[in-house]
Amino acid sequence: MRTKTLKKNKINVVTLGCSKNVYDSEVLMGQLKANNKEVVHEEEGNIVVINTCGFIANAKEESINTILEYVKKKEAGDVDKVFVTGCLSERYKPDLQKEIPSVDQYFGTTELPGLLKALGADYKHELIGERVTTTPKNYAYFKIAEGCDRPCSFCAIPIMRGKHKSTPIEELVIEAEKLAANGVKELILIAQDLTYYGLDLYKKRNLAELLQELVKVDGIEWIRLHYAFPTGFPMEVLEVMKNEPKVCNYIDIPLQHISDSILKSMRRGTTKAKTTKLLEDFRAAVPDMTIRTTLIVGYPGETQEDYEILREWVREMRFERLGCFTYSHEENTHAYNLEDDVPEEVKMERANEIMEIQSQISWELNQQKIGKEFKVVIDRKEGSYFVGRTEFDSPDVDNEVLINAEEGYLRTGEFAHVKITAAEDFDLYAEVV
């Protein structure tokens, strides 16, 4: 017998794609740990599980390259087994099995019990909220629902994630309590669509009630809302945000476009007038709210006029945070039947111009923060700076607050009160007060 087979297996989980995938990897790792398996995240291991993304072309390419990289390692004898799970595997399993047969097994997004079995583990139903978090200790992504019932023409998520399915409030409270007991101070609520939360379970949109239960959890200091859909937004959430200090004055609401003809083709169920009114209502209800949005340029049929409507609206709305992406033509979506007729270079020009406008807006808004004081959480130390965030900033995508580490010691994962001394378009500099 080769000595190689006598060594203890170490399972390396590799995560690609969005925060929902981060969460799924953490649940997988929690299950493996409960089965007494040695599990690591993106370190060396002789068994590899790749949690893939299949959302748009770039993400699919990264997922495939990562699979090929580990298949090569398997062929070289550096790893023993390679398993693939997640959205790419859900969407393209037959193609992947044919094109990359060296992978031991492929699993879709709902096949966790099968994946665990392949890894020599049992799926433990009783493990509500048990996860091995891979984010810095002070925050965790907190998935409140899976799947999506929206009919957006450009989006492949329903193909990969299925119909909307809310997690019951009582289960989420247990999970939040366990995270708090492990030192998590900030919950970043995620779902394909927060707005829809509760409709399937409680026959009404129940995000406000969920927030009211989560704020009671000791140890949780910030609760942040990501990925709310504009149509049918439950306005009582704004009351909770205004009245509950733990709920950050922050919302991520992907709007995608604003030209009425494009919104109609995208099947977004709204108009420019309705969207603008919604944002005005947000700002009237919670005046210091930070609104983050994402936009798509180069959607099929987007004319120069459509683009200019979007561009001028971005100037007018002065979003605190904004990301802009070029349209990706995805098979099996409704928009795939349309001609992908905006040239790639035009898509890039439009996206770059929007981001230049946003960069200037961000710089101007940040200048207004100089001299003001904020509560920040310290995420990490980098070089000669402690790096923190205000309640108006989400990890990895928003502003960071840089505090000179030579002027005093701060603990990562803890909160500090700081005064902003200087500001750039996406970085703030501060001193402790």
Image (tube, rainbow, N blue to C red):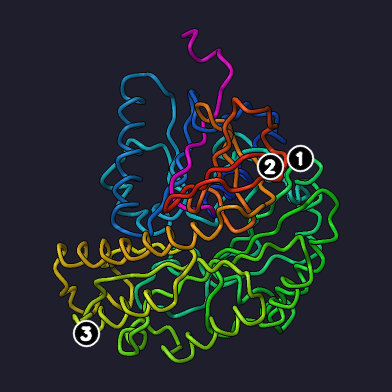
- Residue 160 in the image: state x and y as whole percent: 45, 63
- Residue 359 in the image: state x and y as whole percent: 37, 59
Range covered by the magenta-colored residues? 1-19
N-terminal of the pair, mark 3 or mark 2, is 2
Residue under label 2? 138
Is the residue under label 2 in contact with that under label 1 (CB below 8 Å)?
A: yes
Q: Is 7 part of what is drawn in magenta?
A: yes
**SS of the residue at dot 3?**
helix
**SS of the residue at dot 1?**
loop
**SS of the residue at dot 2?**
loop
Q: Is 300 part of what is drawn in magenta?
A: no
As displayed, is residue 300 above or below residue 290? below
Name which residue lies at 42% across and 34% down: 82
In the image, 75: left or right of 253? left
What's the residue type where badge 2 is placed?
A: Asn
- Residue 258 in the image: state x and y as whole percent: 37, 82
Q: CA distance from mark 3 to mark 1?
A: 51 Å
Residue under label 1? 183
What's the residue type where badge 1 is placed?
A: Gly
In front here: 142 or 128?
142
* Number of residues whose C-alpha sits closer than 10 Å to that of mark 3, classed few (under 14), some (14–19) or many (20 or more): few
As displayed, is residue 389 above or below residue 245? above
Q: CA distance from mark 3 to mark 2?
A: 45 Å
User: How many numbered marks are there?
Assistant: 3
Name which residue lies at 16% across and 72% down: 342
Q: CA distance from mark 1 to mark 2?
A: 6 Å
